Amino acid sequence: MTRLDPLRGFRFLVEIEGIASGAFSRVKGISREVKYESYREGGVIEYEHKLITQVSYPVVVLERGLALDDLWKWALAVADGEVTRKTIWIRLQDEANERRWGWQVEYAMPVKWAATDLDAQTSPVVIESLELAHHGLRKAT
C-alpha cells in the first residue's frame, strides 16, 4: 500500500478564472463555520438540542509581492461599481507537484485591497493583500 504523507502548506497554486495567477506567498481564510442555536426542551435536563441556523464563510485573503496590477484593477473596478465576480481555485500539490487537494471559492469579489507599509529604514518586498467576499467554499475538482 502506498503511504500518503500530509500535504505541505507551501506547495499551492492559485488560479483565478482558470488562469494561474502568479506567486502568491500566502492564502488566509480557507474556512467554513456552521452556526447553530441551542434549544432547551421542557423536562429534558440531560442535553440541549442544537439546531443549525446558517453556514458562514469568512473572507479569503490572497497575498503576494507587488508586481502586477491585475488585482488592483479588479478591486478598483468593483469599487467603481463594475462588480465582476470570479471563481478562484486554491490547489495543494504533493512532493511531485501533482494536484492532490483543492478548494473552489465561488463568486468571489474584492472587498479590500491593501499594501504593506512603506518604510525608508528597511528594504522588504512590498506585499499586496486582496480580501475576497464569496458565496461559498467547495472542494475543487
Image (spheres, grey):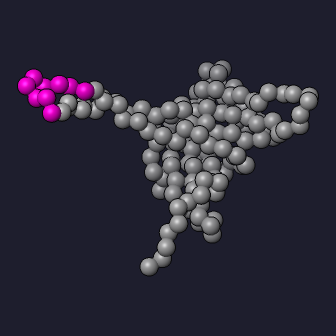
Residue 99 point in image, percent of width and height: 56, 62
Q: Is residue 75 left or right of residue 55?
A: right
Residue 102's place in the image compared with 82, above or below, is below
Q: Main secondary structure of the magenta part?
A: loop
Q: Which residue is at the front of the view, 73 or 49?
A: 49
- Quarter of the image for the N terminus: give it: bottom left
Q: Is residue 42 left or right of residue 108?
A: left
Q: Residue furthest top?
A: 80
Residue at 50% from the left image edge and 32% from the top image edge: 58
Residue 40's place in the image compared with 16, above or below, is above
Q: Is residue 128 left or right of residue 138?
A: right
Residue 80 point in image, percent of width and height: 66, 20
Residue at 59% from the left image edge and 64% from the top image edge: 94
The answer to whether residue 35 is seen in the rendering is yes
Residue at 57% from the left image edge and 49% from the top image edge: 90
Q: Magenta residues?
A: 38-46
Q: Residue furthest right?
A: 120
Q: Which residue is at the front of the view, 113 or 75?
A: 113
User: In which image quadrant can residue 95 be found?
Assistant: bottom right
Residue 32 point in image, percent of width and height: 44, 39
Residue 131's place in the image compared with 90, above or below, is above
User: In which image quadrant can residue 42 be found?
Assistant: top left
Residue at 63% from the left image edge and 49% from the top image edge: 14
Q: Which residue is at the front of the view, 124 or 133?
A: 124
